[in-house]
């Protein structure tokens, strides 16, 4: 193979030798005869002992990690001692005589399949469960645990996919680029690459066939991986590598275009730590505060007092600045015990976000009471939006509930084609709206955003998605309601000018993207961005839309 193609998720060139992620343990044989009765109890006890060793290793690594990596590794350590996983595996040993290695493999596979069936963000955890099982099996066998390769020189990391425990310890001074055979543009691998400003390509079939040590050129802008490297490519990659540590920063205060007009850049956050990171990165405010961090992994919803205290901590960091709070986006694809309902055949199209209100109105009303209490004690400009609003009646109901509590700036997430096509009607009672491009893309193309096989479809550059963004912005212009974009699309320095050209009034992104996006926007006028958007809309597919924009940019 001299060339292969995948989905580009983080721009930039890189040249270097391929290093493969350590292969996971081979699948334990399913044909071994059942263990004799006297041995089953002893073999069952090996499982929690091995899991404890994995958890200890992850906790130790977490203690040495910096920033978000520590939290990711700690979460993986907790997963290693999950009583459901370990209990199921031990039961297979005791009841069926299955060997310990095979038992943990089967137990993890069952949980992973259930998570994949749920779809959405829950499907992401399937890879995490499999990674933990691989580590436990390695300990049971006395083998080294899987992980990142060691090398004497910087390398291009190639893998089937990356687990959080791997990505958390990735050293950007050693890794030149990321290439995975699976995953999609919204996977944690893609998000991490953009955060670290590493060129990255996902869903690249055939890349695992590259021999270890092969020098390759990776183009994170076109999704191409090639073993045929020109001198010009070598030079561009070397220049990009030298410039990476001095990537543009964002001083805040809005980006000024060459025509003198401005746009504010906000940050997406999901915790107090991320709020502090956004503040340090110069964000003009918070374009999306995901409140799920307060509700996950709990048997009961947090009470009003606890929620109020958490919201106040975050709001106090942004006096005088906008903070857009999204109410709980949970349900079928992110199940919580206190919101659980009957099993659904198609969870991605099920009861989630606003739709959970019908059966559990108290969860929303408590949250709105807490947001209102926190807002009244803060000087931040608090806006509240609801996820998965699809009709004008739903928008009106949500707005009424907010305003009854003194929350005077309310709006909706636009995440479905129905909401985008009827934006003018839905926005009639709103004060703002935010486009969630991740879900909008998934629902427009009928492609699961976590399914690597469909990664080319789950691309916000798809012309149909761009047209729905344009329709939403047109609805905002007709009603004089500001429209923001808070999906991962806003973090793409190439796509950001197109979004402004389509009519977006503000962009919100991961804090690390603020500098590169500001740099891209600051070189253009609004007229140029409108022309850029028109060119992208006229392209027949996502790849050509991206290529047209790249050629037209300065």
Image (cartoon, helix red, strand yellow):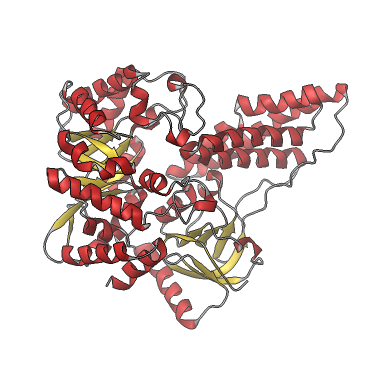
Q: Is residue 367 left or right of residue 167?
A: left
Residue 520: image location, x then y, percent: 27, 63
* Quarter of image, res 293: top left
* 228 shown above or below 506: below
Question: Going 50% across and 38% down the picture, which residue do you hit?
Answer: 119
Question: Going 87% across and 21% down the picture, which residue do you hit?
Answer: 38
* 250 shown above or below 442: below
Quick one: which residue is furthest to the bottom in this view? 231
Instruction: Please state which of residues 242 and 368 is positioned toward the viewer in this rendering.
Output: 368
Instruction: Please state which of residues 358 and 292 is positioned toward the viewer in this rendering.
Output: 358
Question: Going 56% across and 46% down the picture, which residue do you hit?
Answer: 163
Q: In this view of the protein, can residue 56 be seen by the observer?
A: no
Q: Quadrant of the N terminus?
A: bottom right
Residue 60: image location, x then y, percent: 57, 39
* 146 shown above or below 238: above
Instruction: Please state which of residues 324 and 132 is positioned toward the viewer in this rendering.
Output: 324
Question: Going 61% across and 29% down the picture, which residue do you hit?
Answer: 81
Residue 488: image location, x then y, percent: 36, 50
Q: In this view of the protein, can residue 467 be seen by the observer?
A: yes
Residue 105: image location, x then y, percent: 70, 37
Q: Quadrant of the C terminus?
A: bottom left
Instruction: Please state which of residues 410 and 351 is positioned toward the viewer in this rendering.
Output: 351
Count the marks: 0
Q: Is residue 24 left or right of residue 289?
A: right
* Quarter of image, res 138: top right
* 298 shown above or below 65: above
């Amino acid at each position: 193979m001299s060339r292969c193609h995948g989905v580009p998720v983080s721009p930039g060139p890189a040249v270097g030798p391929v290093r493969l992620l350590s292969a996971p343990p081979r699948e334990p044989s399913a044909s071994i005869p059942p263990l004799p009765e006297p041995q089953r109890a002893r073999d069952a006890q090996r499982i929690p002992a091995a899991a404890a060793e994995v958890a200890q290793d992850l906790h130790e690594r977490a203690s040495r990690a910096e920033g978000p990596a520590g939290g990711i590794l700690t979460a993986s350590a907790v997963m290693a001692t999950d009583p459901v996983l370990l209990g199921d595996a031990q039961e297979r040993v005791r009841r069926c005589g299955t060997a310990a290695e095979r038992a943990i493999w089967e137990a993890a596979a069952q949980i992973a399949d259930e998570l994949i069936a749920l779809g959405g963000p829950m499907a992401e955890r399937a890879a995490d469960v499999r990674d933990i099982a691989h580590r436990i099996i390695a300990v049971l066998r006395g083998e080294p645990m899987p992980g990142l390769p060691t090398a004497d020189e910087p390398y291009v990391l190639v893998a089937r996919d990356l687990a959080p425990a791997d990505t958390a310890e990735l050293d950007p001074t050693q890794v030149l680029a990321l290439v995975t055979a699976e995953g999609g543009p919204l996977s944690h691998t893609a998000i991490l690459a953009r955060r670290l400003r590493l060129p990255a390509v996902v869903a690249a079939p055939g890349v695992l066939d590259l021999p270890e040590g092969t020098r390759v050129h990776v183009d994170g802008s076109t999704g191409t991986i090639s073993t045929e490297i020109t001198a010009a490519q070598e030079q561009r990659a070397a220049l990009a590598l030298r410039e990476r540590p001095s990537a543009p920063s964002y001083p805040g205060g809005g980006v000024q275009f060459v025509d003198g007009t401005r746009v504010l850049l906000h940050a997406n956050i999901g915790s107090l730590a991320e709020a502090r990171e956004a503040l340090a990165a110069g964000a003009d405010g918070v374009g999306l505060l995901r409140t799920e961090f307060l509700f996950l992994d709990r048997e009961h919803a947090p009470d009003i007092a606890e929620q109020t205290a958490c919201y106040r901590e975050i709001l106090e960091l942004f006096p005088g600045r906008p903070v857009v709070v999204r109410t709980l986006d949970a349900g079928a694809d992110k199940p919580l015990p206190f919101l659980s309902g009957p099993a659904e055949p198609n969870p991605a199209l099920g009861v989630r976000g606003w739709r959970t209100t019908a059966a559990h109105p108290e969860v929303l009303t408590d949250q709105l009471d807490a947001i209102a209490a926190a807002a009244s004690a803060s000087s931040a400009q608090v806006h509240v939006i609801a996820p998965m609003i699809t009709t004008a009646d739903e928008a009106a109901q949500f707005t009424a509930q907010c305003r009854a509590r003194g929350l005077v700036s309310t709006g909706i997430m636009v995440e479905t084609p129905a909401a985008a096509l009827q934006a003018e009607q839905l926005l009639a009672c709103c004060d703002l709206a935010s486009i969630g491009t991740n879900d909008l893309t998934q629902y427009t193309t009928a492609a699961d955003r976590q399914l690597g096989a469909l990664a080319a479809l789950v691309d916000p550059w798809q012309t149909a998605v761009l047209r729905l963004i344009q329709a939403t912005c047109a609805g905002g212009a007709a009603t004089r309601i500001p429209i923001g974009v808070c999906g991962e699309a806003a973090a793409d320095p190439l796509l950001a000018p197109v979004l402004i050209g389509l009519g977006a009034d503000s962009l919100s992104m991961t804090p690390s993207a603020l500098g590169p996006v500001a740099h891209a926007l600051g070189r253009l006028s609004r007229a140029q961005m409108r022309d850029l958007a028109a060119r992208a809309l006229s392209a027949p597919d996502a790849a050509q839309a991206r290529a047209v924009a790249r050629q037209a940019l300065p």
